Image (spheres, rainbow, N blue to C red):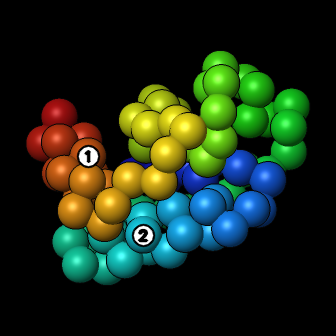
Amino acid sequence: MKIQILGTGCPRCKTLASNAETAVKELALEAEIEKVTGIEDILKFQILAMPGLAIDGQVKAAGRVPTIDEIKQLLGACKEA
């Protein structure tokens, strides 16, 4: 599983990265967390607001910081699929 944090490194992006890391640890998942900070790379995901969260290349949230519990639900749904 690959989790991508889409953002330029602002405080909200850092909070999202921290929430994602905590969610992965609490679920005991094997996942790679990648921070996508280049504007051209972020634009490829076609999000209109940052930060963004993508799981296995699919955008799951944009323009807000999902809670740890929200991220855990998203990861659980992706794991089952």
Q: Is residue 72 left or right of residue 61?
A: left
Q: Which residue is mark 2?
A: 19
| Residue drawn at x 56%, y 50% as measured from the top left | 4
Q: Is residue 72 above or below residue 21?
A: above
| Residue drawn at x 20%, y 71% as measured from the top left | 27
| Nearest to the observer: residue 80 or residue 4 | 4
The mark lying in front, picked from 1 and 2, is 2
Q: Is residue 5 above or below residue 31?
A: above
| Nearest to the observer: residue 53 or residue 67 | 67
- Amino acid type, mark 1: Leu
Q: Which residue is mark 1?
A: 74
Residue 24 seen by the camera: yes
| Residue drawn at x 44%, y 38% as measured from the top left | 61
Find residue 18 and report its horizontal and vertical position in percent: 50, 74
| Nearest to the observer: residue 76 or residue 64 | 64
| Residue 53, label in figure | none
- Amino acid type, mark 2: Asn
Quadrant for residue 60, please give it. Answer: top left
